[in-house]
Image (cartoon, grey):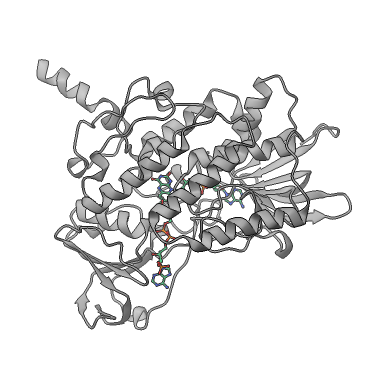
Amino acid sequence: YCYNMNKKRVGIIGAGPSGLAQLRAFEAAKNQGLEVPEVVCFEKQSNWGGMWNYSWRTGVGKYGEPIHGSMYKYLWSNGPKECLEFSDYSFDEHFKKPISSYPPRPVLFDYIQGRIKKNNVRDYIRFDTTVRWVNYNEETKKFQIVLDNLKIDKTYTEEFDYLVVASGHFSTPNMPYFEGIEEFPGQVLHAHDFRGADPYKDQDLLIIGSSYSAEDIGVQCHKHGAKSVTLSYRSNPIGVNWPDGIKEVPLLKHFDGDVAYFKDGTSKRFDAVIMCTGYQHKFPFLPDELRLKTKNNLYPDHLYKGIFFNDAPNLIYLGMQDQYYTFNMFDAQAWVARDFIMETYKIPSKPERRLDINKWLVENDKLKTSFDHVDFQSAYIKDLLRLSDYPDFNVDKVAEMFKEWLKDKDENILTYRDKTFQSVVTGTMAETHHTEWMDELDDSKERYLYAEDKEEVEEDV
Ligand code: FAD
Ligand code: NA7
């Protein structure tokens, strides 16, 4: 690869929603007539979309790399789409008609692609390329990146002035041990390897965990015909109004054969166990001094404005927070990162940055309820929006929608996806979907977007 030695070079790791947001941010500057640095994005998969690029594979991919994807079939957005809408590319612009508030994965994947297909962003991405290792040269202030071209099995090195890590953090399982699990006769897997509810039809299923994955995988398996779903929590139950067929119990103590014993003294026989026990922030390509070390939380330490690595701010992390906001948060981050790289946004000295980080960490520690969490991340988004020209959106209204969503889930976990919300970007009210979520077993884009029209045509005939 040859490149212009005079231009600054920016390397981006990952072409998921965060990496694509970064590419889009530079395109937006270019479209304004500004001169942008040379940008190269490395993606180990053969296509973009990150988590939204569904793979049937588990374990390793065709080139022997760990499979990134944790997505599964029949996944419908777990929050209102109005809370993640790109403020520079609305759902209306993409779909040309109002759609429901909780689309299935292929529909959201289509939306993500729509925005970047408008530009030649694909040209900046090297697919089937894994970032193997990164060195930072203190003298030249450059990152040396060791890359593997998986297709032709070739290792090479390139230098960059800035490095954007957008490799996601819901990919490497956190897998706890429970006594006796090695003798459990059924399947034991982590949510990362779950690919859909089909294998669990008519089964008694044990799920460990009490967060998004536990809730969604549990409800999906119930919907698709599991005999029973038991959710086991460590700290707090999810605590919604569960329907018959799903229940929550305290933490698993141990197994005896296929029988699980829980902390409250109860026990039950199971066919399969799914660990919905979260993920590790894992960056096997980064040395100690550059690596973000954090648990999954709303304000990881060491990141100024949630993105600039404080010890070496030319290293930028995107999307490393636990997420209420997703696509629009990655955008707000990527626009600020772009302006820093293009030197139109300056960051203060390291001690000042530390003070600002500490201020957020103190606030984060005080949070108690889910509503507090929503307000905290909303305040963070507002802080970011002040710093760049990413189109402003009504964050307070989005925060209200998140709170409505939390209440809807509390009331009825099986029907919350039938609710509709209003876009803060266009003002459009979402459509009520043609089929109630509990009755809809087909998550294809065709069925979602066109099924109703097709039925009408058939009726006319
Ligand atoms: P990712 O989407 O994870 O993308 C990271 C990319 O980096 C991947 O393409 C990966 O292949 C690449 N990569 C990683 N390491 C390397 C390397 N060494 N070299 C080269 N490339 C590399 N969010 C919502 O808003 N709504 C939902 O309904 C929702 N459901 C979810 C369901 C599941 C099961 C999971 C796991 C997440 C869900 N999310 C949801 C959150 C999701 O993480 C974000 O929507 C979004 O995908 C995060 O984008 P990202 O680009 O930061 O990371
Ligand atoms: P989260 O949100 O990080 O939650 C992890 C859950 O796992 C949480 O309930 C933890 O309980 C639980 N956990 C972690 N370790 C253990 C052990 N050792 N024993 C029992 N329970 C444990 O991950 P999710 O996968 O739910 O969500 C991640 C993303 O995927 C999210 O963005 C979704 O959109 C999809 P705790 O409360 O800490 O006791």
x and y percent of residue 85 in the render? 44, 34
Q: Quadrant of the C terminus?
A: top left
Closest to the observer, 108 or 72: 108
Q: Residue at x 35, y 40 (%)?
A: 80
In the image, taking residue 54 as reference, residue 218 lies left or right, namely left
Closest to the observer, 57 or 329: 329
Q: Residue at x 36, y 72 (%)?
A: 234
Q: Quadrant of the N terminus?
A: top right
Question: In this rendering, does residue 85 appear at all?
Answer: yes
In the image, taking residue 456 as reference, residue 446 lies left or right, namely right
Residue 47 vs 449, above or below: the answer is below
In the image, taking residue 380 as reference, residue 185 lies left or right, namely left
Residue 421 vs 45, above or below: the answer is above
Q: Residue at x 78, y 43 (%)?
A: 161
Residue 79 vs 264, above or below: the answer is above
In the image, taking residue 459 as reference, residue 4 lies left or right, namely right
x and y percent of residue 418 in the render? 23, 39
Question: In this rendering, does residue 461 appear at all?
Answer: no
Residue 69 vs 301, above or below: the answer is above
Closest to the observer, 382 or 157: 382
Q: Residue at x 38, y 37 (%)?
A: 81
Q: Residue furthest top?
A: 460
Closest to the observer, 243 or 117: 243
